[in-house]
Amino acid sequence: MSFPGGGYEGKNWTEFMEGIWERNPVFVMVLGMCPTLAVTVSAINSISMGLATTFVMAASCWLVSLLRNYVPKEVRIATYIVIIATFVTVVDYAIQAISLDLYEALGAYIQLIVANCLVLGRAEAHAARNAPVPAALNGIGMGLGFTLGLTMIGGVREILGAGTFFGVSLFGANFQPWVVMVLPPGGFFVMGGWLLLFAVVRARRERIALAAQET
Amino acid sequence: MIRESLGQILVTSILSGNFVLAMFLGMCPFLGVTHSVSVAFPLGLATTFVIVIASLSAYALNLVLGLLHLEFLRLICYIVVIAAAVQLVEMFVKKQSPALFRALGIYLPLITTNCAVLGVALFQTAREYDFAQSLTFALGGGIGFTIALVLLASVRERIELSDVPGVLKGTAMSLMLAGILSLSFMGFAGLGG
Amino acid sequence: MNVDALAAEATQTTAMVRTLGLVSLICGLIIVGSFEVTLPAAQANRRLAAERAVFKVLPAAKSIAEYVALPTGGIEPKVGAGETALPPGAVKFYAAYDAAGQLAGIAAEGAAKGYADTVRVMFGYAPACQCVVGIGVVSMRETPGIGDKIITDKEFVANFKALDTRLNKDLSALANEIKVVKHGTKTQPWQIDAIAGATITSRAVGKGINEAAQVLLPRLVPNLEKIRSRP
């Protein structure tokens, strides 16, 4: 499946990029929702969770791909889950060593990365059928797309619900924060809002394309 | 560390701390399976069953791991036990009711990656609940999960027959509905002390 | 035919067992390795966080020592690191010493369920007046702008400048239970005026301190002389 020279790099680039926008895990595939809504109360939490998930995805996809020819079909899900759980444990310890404040903020949702459908889904659908390097690149791409999606939601919730962005106050002391945005309903509303926006943009694009065809 | 009574835990886990609407656990089935109540309700029950098993196993595992000072293996052990429990439930449902097995489809094995199941195990460990508290937490969580699923499914079934703008159809609509449900459940805050 | 089928099944099972064994070994090594590597940094972080919290509630403190109060009524220095090293039923507390090595106060944690999740507070206790002299929030997930007023609301914080936690005559419990009362109705030094509009979080703070003090102080007060000066 590998093409010599330029073609091979091209294929790897596609592997990496498809997860960023075209098949964005948050807005297109709608996978990994639990941490998406729980943790995105601020932009910095969103990025941290996203990067933690990206690391787990990159490492798990790589290891799953390395072992793909040695794992019998019957035990593959169990094996993938054990591998993913391993790297999630590693990330859990790493965050404790880096910053306790971050650890408190993300809480149990770090360990819940194991139950993130996105990670197991990519391992099963992609890493198990491809070579380690493309698998890892796809994992990183999906992870970064996930981070992007999380940050878009977290950014909006933080701006509306706390008046800050990455901790930097935007509106001054007289701003009345829209508190519901940093509470659970806000998570649902903001994500629904983004999906609605994308649907509107897409519908408009289709209408314009249709009108252009008719003329 | 904190002493919560069983009644408090039960009421909180069903209402003000509802697993889906307040803690965002179990979102995949919440958005994926709630197109009809007749599928949502059995899935809720199956998940409740797995949650209770997972909670009891996690409690036992935690005791054993604590004795052996192997706490760092906690996450792996939890998830393996959950996978085994789901496998058992799958075989049971397949034998007892093949129709239900077909209706639930892929969502039955997906209970393994349901954050609610692993979440129960993790939260009860973090809050250092004892045996009775863990069991109540698991039961309440499962019941709350089922209620939330059935609520959203009933609303979505009705809305099928209404005139919904094209851009809002699908996940966006479900999320907005879930947001309203979550907002209303916030009214239960403080209930149960 | 039958023997072949059996043989095929046997190799399948060995293959599965072998794979699972190999994967478990690799994963086990990764986990243990990362645990060992991150342990010193994580412990240093925890120690720093504890010191920061104690220094905040007891400003005169310059150093801390960790102790445990046993269910049998004695106190002893805490050995071992991490949460798992506590003897059963024991309660952890910090003895804070000033620059001269004399006891500046005691600090301990209390926790109770607030609006969203657990509210953990660190409170400082002065043996001289047998009262709580300050609180700091260790962790909370309360509603921003409402629940987090427990840090910013000056009137609420003033509750804890001299919160009466004297023990009763036989030193078995607090003479008066710490209670959180409706905003503006505080009459006794062992009561806490709740924040108007944030009663649930205020009650959590009061409950946490009360429960912790009821367990810790009867065990601590009779043994204060042991820790008067830095060992």
Image: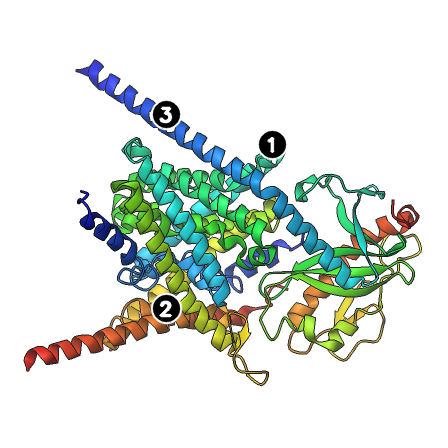
Q: Viewed as shown, does residue C5 lie left or right of C183?
A: left
Q: Between B31 and A167, which is closer to the camera in this rendering?
A: A167
In the rendering, which numbered label is found on residue A207? none
In which image quadrant can residue C55 be found? bottom right
Q: Between C145 and A56, which is closer to the camera in this rendering?
A: A56
Residue C208 seen by the camera: yes
Residue B48 seen by the camera: no
Q: Quadrant of the C terminus of chain A?
A: bottom left
Q: Is residue C126 above or below residue C182?
A: above
Of the residues shown, which amino acid type is indicated by label 3?
Arg
Of the residues shown, which amino acid type is indicated by label 1?
Leu
Same chain letter for marks 3 and 1: no
Whether residues under marks 3 and 2 lie with C-beta atoms below 8 angstroms apart, the answer is no
Label 3 to label 1: alpha-carbon separation: 25 Å
Neighbor class of circle 2 (other Cα within 10 Å; few <14, some 14-19, many 20+) is many
Q: Viewed as shown, does residue C140 lie left or right of C121?
A: left
Residue at 38%, 69% (x, y): give it: A191
In the rendering, which numbered label is found on residue B68? 1
Residue with the mark numbered 3: C18
Label 1 to label 2: alpha-carbon separation: 44 Å
Going from the N terminus, do you reach mark 1 or mark 2 first? 1
In the rendering, which numbered label is found on residue B175? 2
Q: Position of residue B9 (x, y in %)?
A: 58, 56
Q: Between A4 and C134, which is closer to the camera in this rendering?
A: A4
Which circle, 3 or 2, is nearer the viewer?
3
